[in-house]
Image: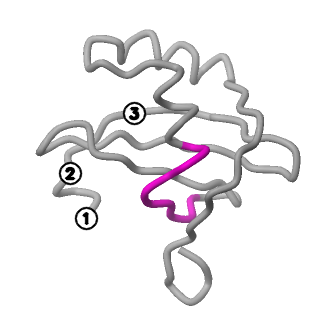
């Protein structure tokens, strides 16, 4: 959300890189069907984006009826850097 409490929407394709932490988290999420390609698509064309701490953004997508995937990333003019990826209960983030 921006300073007025509105969701931030974006649909611009940029290069996507991953921190070592995000790469490690992705390995753990394979049993939920989450792939690097999925995450790249989600941050390049997010359904919902909210503001996070330290100027970071959080893309949120639904994995299952009761589960969301949250992708914390930093964005510059040239690229998107995925900081971490984690699942969460849908009811907690709505």
- Which range is magenta? 43-52
Residue 58 at x, y = what percent? 52, 52
9 in relation to 13, above or below: below
Mark nearer the N terminus (3 vs 1): 3
Q: Secondary structure at mark 1?
A: loop
Q: Secondary structure at mark 2?
A: helix
Label 1: how many residues lie within 10 Å, few (<14), some (14-19) or many (20+)?
Answer: few
Is residue 46 found inside the magenta-colored segment of the image? yes
Tag 1 and tag 2, C-beta contact below 8 Å:
yes
61 in relation to 26, above or below: below
Q: Secondary structure at mark 3?
A: strand
| 71 vs 79, nearest the viewer | 79
As drawn, the label of residue 86 is 3
Label 3: how many residues lie within 10 Å, few (<14), some (14-19) or many (20+)?
Answer: some
As drawn, the label of residue 72 is none
Image quadrant where residue 83 sits: top right
Residue bearing the label numbered 2: 90
Image quadrant where residue 22 sits: top right
73 in relation to 82, above or below: below
Residue 75 at x, y = what percent? 75, 50
Identify the colour scheme used.
one colour
Instruction: Tell me the CA gap for discs 1 and 2.
Output: 6 Å
Residue bearing the label numbered 1: 94
Instruction: Tell me the CA gap for discs 2 and 3.
Output: 12 Å
Q: Determine the residue positioned at 61% across, 44% down.
A: 44
Q: Determine the residue positioned at 54% across, 33% down.
A: 84
């Amino acid at each position: 959300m921006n300073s007025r409490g509105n969701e931030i929407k974006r649909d611009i394709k940029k290069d996507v890189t991953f921190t070592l932490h995000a790469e490690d988290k992705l390995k753990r999420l394979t049993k939920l069907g989450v792939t690097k390609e999925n995450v790249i698509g989600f941050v390049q064309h997010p359904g919902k984006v909210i503001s996070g701490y330290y100027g970071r953004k959080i893309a949120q997508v639904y994995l299952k009826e009761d589960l969301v995937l949250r992708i914390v990333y930093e964005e510059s003019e040239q690229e998107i850097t995925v900081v971490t990826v984690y699942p969460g209960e849908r009811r907690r983030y709505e």
